[in-house]
Amino acid sequence: MLVRRIGLSFSRSTRFLSSSSNSRDDVANAIAELNKWLCDICAYMVMIIQEMESVFGEPPSTSNLSSPSTQFLNEEPKVLPPKLGENELGLTHIGSKGEAQMVDVSSKEASKRSAIATCKVILGKKVFDLVASNQMAKGDVLTVAKLGGIGGAKQTSNLIPLCHNIGLSHVRVDLTLNTKDFSVEVEGEAASTGKTGVEMEALTAVTVAGLTVYDMCKAVSKDIQITDIKLMRKTGGKSGDWSREK
């Protein structure tokens, strides 16, 4: 009803104002109608606001915008690691607040540990033939790469930020020429008796050995690829033995 009344008042007032034959009394009446129309509009808006407040509640005051309950809007998000059960495995290098940390192994018992890793260096036929015949300008590729891999294993804690500096009891690096795909297959093994595993040492050994092969042969070809770096087996430690399925 209110909307209809507003429409009638507005149409009547505009009709009076648009007519040039209206007297002063007619103009005054039209202005009065417009004023009434504006009052009706205000009353209608107040009614709508009251109706919305009854449904949705009153809007929050501006003083609440700086309250502690809304301060989180201005804070940077923090990534927290999920809480794990007793038998679940998590990322041990992440602290309770999501920061990087070195694992404290002081409470662990020392045990015999070993790990074997492998990688492949694809040479291509031309480079492969030169390596196989020991014709590379820098010398014996396989022997130098073997020594590079052993030295790399001993430097693992200096290369990987959160690795422990452990005493290795044994490092083995073997390189074998594969005539089927003109590659060098690298296998590395690390062993220790301590409180943490030697997987990273075995992986570092084969990686550095592969890089050494590349360095020895890069003058002949830049197309050499170092691929398939992976852990094959590990023994010892709290998690027990593990072997990659072939």
Image (tube, rainbow, N blue to C red):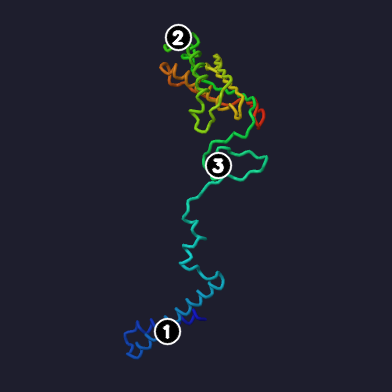
- Tell me whether circle 3 and circle 1 mark residues in contact (CB < 8 Å): no
Q: Nearer the viewer, residue 28 or 178?
A: 178
Q: Nearer the viewer, mark 2 or mark 1?
A: 2
- Quadrant of image for the C terminus: top right
Image-based side of 205 in relation to 41, left or right: right
Query: Residue 232, relative to residue 81: is it above or below?
Result: above
Residue 29 image position (x, y, % from top left): 38, 88
Query: Residue 153, relative to residue 126: is it above or below?
Result: below
- Classify mark 3: residues with Cα within 10 Å, few (<14), some (14-19) or many (20+): some
Query: Which residue type carries mark 3?
Result: Gly
Residue 205 image position (x, y, % from top left): 53, 22
Question: Which residue is under mark 3?
Answer: 95
First in sequence, mark 2 or 1: give its number. 1
Query: Which residue type carries mark 1?
Result: Lys
First in sequence, mark 3 or 2: give its number. 3
Question: Which residue is under mark 2?
Answer: 135
Residue at 63% from the left image edge and 38% from the top image edge: 89
Residue 7 at least partly seen = no
